[in-house]
Amino acid sequence: MTTGARPEHSATLRDYLGVLRRRKWIILLAVVLVPAAAVGFSLHQQKLYQAQAKVLLSTQNLAAQLTGTQNTGINETQTEIVQTQAEVARVPAIAGRVLRRVPGTGLTVSGFLADSSVSASANADILTFSVTNHSPGRASRLVDEYASSYTVYRRHLDTAAIHAAIVNVDDRITRLVAAGGGHSSLYSSLLDRQQTLATMSALQTSNATVVQYASKTPLVQPKTSRNAILGLFLGLVLGIGLAFLWEALDTRVRTAQEIGDRLGGLPMLGRIPVPGKALRSKNRLVMLGDPSAVEAEAFRMLRTSLEFTTLGRDVRRIMITSAVEQEGKSTTIANLAVALARAGQRVILVDLDLRRPYLDKFFNLEGPGITQIALGRSTLADALQLGTVALSERNPRRTPSPNVRVNLAPGANGNGNGHGDGSRVKGVLAVLPSGPIPPDPGEFVGTAVLGELLDELAELADVVLIDAPPVLHVGDAMTLSSKVDGIIVATKMKVVRRHLLGELARLLAATPAPVLGFVVTGAEEEDAAYGYGYGYGYGYAPRPYAEREPSEQVGSDA
C-alpha cells in the first residue's frame, strides 16, 4: 500500500462555523458567566458620586497696562499655561485649605487628592475640577471649595511680588525718615514708588475665576448596565477565543473526510453507528438480534462497498484492525460476517486478537479455538463444527444454535453456498474463536503453522474475516498483514487522534497486503455538517442480494 501526502486543507467559513457549533457550550458559558461576574462585582461596589466645577483662566494684567510696566514672565503658549495651572491646582496647600474649610470629611490631604482631579480643556482656558465621594452633597461642597481655594491661591501668587515690593519700600522710607532724610530727593522717589505699588496692588485683578459651581452629582460607581454590556462583549470574545483554543488543543478527528485525508486518501467503506444499549449490554450483534433495524443497514452498505472494492480481485482473507483499542473493530467484523453470510456467502470469522479476544462472547462459543488447532490439540473440523452458525435470509430472526453441525464443503447438504437440496439456508457463517491465549501472541501470529491454517480456511470459504489487534500497540497486525489479501481499518469517531492517524498511515504504507479502505465507527458522533443521519429506515426486512433478479442486483439491498 502506498499513501500520498495528506492534502492541504485551507480553512473556510464553514470550518470556522463548525468550530463555533461544536464548542457552543464554551461560548454560552462565557457569555453567561462573564456578564454575571461583572454584574455581581458592580453590585458589591460602593456607590460613588462625582461633582464638577469649572474655573476660567485669564492672562490679562490690568495693573501693568495702567501703570505702563512690562510683564517679564516666561513666554509660553496658552495651552502650556493652562496645563501648568492644572498642575498647580494639585499642590497639597490647596487641598489642605479645602479640608479645613469643609470639616468632617475624614479625608487626609493625600486621600483628597486621590479622590479628586483637575483637567485642562484642549481648546479653552478652563480648568475642570472633579471630586468623587460616597455622599453626593459632600462631593458638591468639596468641589466648590476646591475651585474657590484654587482662585485664592492663584491670586496670592499673582500679587505676592507686589506685596513684597511694598513692604520693602515702606521699610526704606521708615529708615530714611529716622535718619533725618525726610526732605531729600530719595524720600520723594520712594514715596512715588510706594504710590505706584499701592495703585498696582489695588488694580491687580484675579487671573482665575469660578464660572460654574457643582449643580449635578451623577452616580459614577457602580455602572451596572455598562459593566453588563462590556461583560457580554468580553464574554463573547473570550468564549470564541476559548472555543478556538480548545479546538486547537483537541486532536480528536471529527469527520470521515479528515480520516481519509490523514490516511493518505483511503476510500471510506462505510459509516457504522454505535449499537444500542440493549445490544451492548448483552453482547449481541444487531445483524443477529435485529437485522431489520436501521442500524443493520449500515452493515449491508459496508458489505456492498466491500464487494465493489474487491470486484475482480482474488481477496479472500481480509483482516480488520484499528489504531488503538475500543474503536469497534470486533463488533464491525462480526456484523459484517453475518451480513456476508446472509448474502449467500460462506464466511469464516477468525479471532486472532490474542491480546483481547472478544468474538466468542458475541456467538456464545465455548469450543476449541485456533491456538488449539495450531498446537494439534484439536482439528479444524471439530472447531468449525462447534463454531458454526447457519443463517436464513428469508427468516432472519430465526437463527439456529451455534452448536449445529454444518459442513462447509461446497455442495454438502445444501448448506455450503446456497445450492443443493433447495434449503432455505442461503449462507453459512463459521466462527473460529481464539482459544487459550499463548504466552507470546506476537510470536504465534508469525508462525508458518498459522499461515498454513489460514490458507486452508481460505479454501473452505468464500471469505475469511480476521479480527486482529490494534496496529499501534503491538506488532501482531503488521505480522498478520503478510498472511492476508486485504486490510480494513476501523476508526472510532472522536476517539482516534490526528497524530495516531499519521502514525497509522505510516505503518499501513509498509504492509505487504493492500488496504481496502476504512470504516468509521461511532458515525452518529460525526460533525453534523459532514455526517449522515440514520433516521431513515424500512418497514420490512430487505430482500437479500443473492435472492434478487439479475436486473435488481445492480444496486444491492445496502
Image (tube, rainbow, N blue to C red):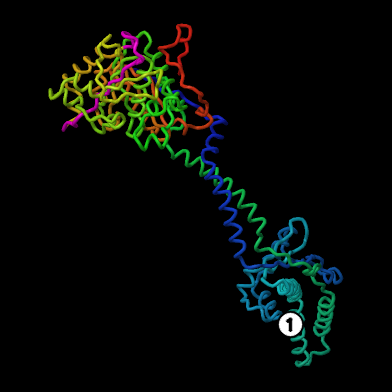
The residue that label 1 is drawn on is 168
Query: Which residue is outermost to the top?
Result: 550
Give the total of numbered labels.
Answer: 1
Q: Is 204 or 265 nearer to us in this picture?
A: 265
* In the depicted structure, whether residue 524 falls above or below residue 126: above
Amino acid type of the residue that numbered disc 1 sits on in the rendered structure:
Asn
User: In the image, which residues are magenta?
Assistant: 417-439
Residue 212 screen position, x and y as percent? 80, 67
Residue 102 screen position, x and y as percent? 70, 79
Judge whether residue 207 can be spotted in this image: no
- Which quadrant of the figure contains the C terminus? top left
Q: Secondary structure at mark 1?
A: helix
Judge whether residue 295 can be spotted in this image: yes
Residue at x 51%, y 44% (from the top left corner): 242
Along the horizontal axis of the image, is 120 left or right of 270?
right
Q: Is 153 or 491 nearer to us in this picture?
A: 491
Along the horizontal axis of the image, is 452 left or right of 116?
left
- Which quadrant of the figure contains the N terminus? top left
Q: Say which quarter of the image contains residue 271.
A: top left
Q: Is 242 or 293 nearer to us in this picture?
A: 293
Query: Which residue is outermost to the left?
Result: 376
Residue at x 24%, y 27% (from the top left corner): 433
Residue 152 screen position, x and y as percent? 75, 75
Neighbourhood count class around disc 1 (C-alpha, 10 Å): few under 14, some 14–19, many 20 upward? few
Is 194 colored magenta in this rendering? no
Residue at x 51%, y 40% (from the top left corner): 244
Secondary structure predominantly adopted by residues drawn in magenta: loop
Q: Is 513 or 524 nearer to us in this picture?
A: 524
Residue 389 screen position, x and y as percent? 30, 22
Query: Which residue is outermost to the right?
Result: 66
* In the depicted structure, whether residue 355 falls above or below residue 2: below
